[in-house]
Image (tube, rainbow, N blue to C red):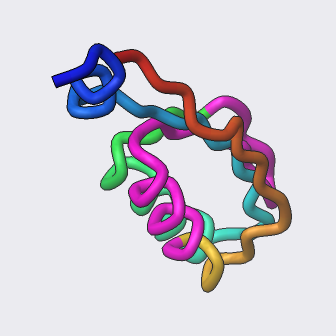
Amino acid sequence: MSYLSEEIQTKFLQRELALVKVVAEGDLQDAALGVVGAWSGRLLELGQNHFTAEVSGDPDKISRFIAALVPFGLSASFRSGAVSLG
């Protein structure tokens, strides 16, 4: 087996960071904050009618997290792109 083949077979850790902004008020905002908590996200900023949060994880988790916030008024999202360590 060649060196390259061994390297390709090595497992690696892959993570991504996402920042999201949600514009919502009252009960809708509370429900959206519940989603952030359920996904082990972190609240960065809380306003009367908006909040900003972050979450990290594998790229599939980030996609599902963003999709889960769309019904609550997701107004912006930023993804770092995958970072890997092998």
Q: What residue appears at the point 57 percent right and 37 percent down from the top-left corner?
A: 82
Q: Is residue 61 left or right of residue 29?
A: left
Residue 85 position by quadrant: top left
> As rendered, which of 25 and 18 lies closer to the eye?
18
Against 60, residue 15 (above or below) is: above
Q: Position of residue 80 (x, y in %)?
A: 70, 36
Q: Is residue 19 magenta?
A: no
Q: Quadrant of the C terminus?
A: top left
Q: Position of residue 29 (x, y in %)?
A: 61, 66
> As rendered, which of 47 and 15 lies closer to the eye?
15
Q: Position of residue 46 (x, y in %)?
A: 71, 40
Magenta residues (range)? 44-68
> As rendered, which of 34 and 76 lies closer to the eye?
76
> As rendered, which of 45 and 60 lies closer to the eye?
60
Q: Quadrant of the N terminus?
A: top left
Against 9, residue 67 (above or below) is: below
Q: Is residue 59 magenta?
A: yes
Q: What residue appears at the point 58 percent right and 65 percent down from the top-left corner?
A: 66
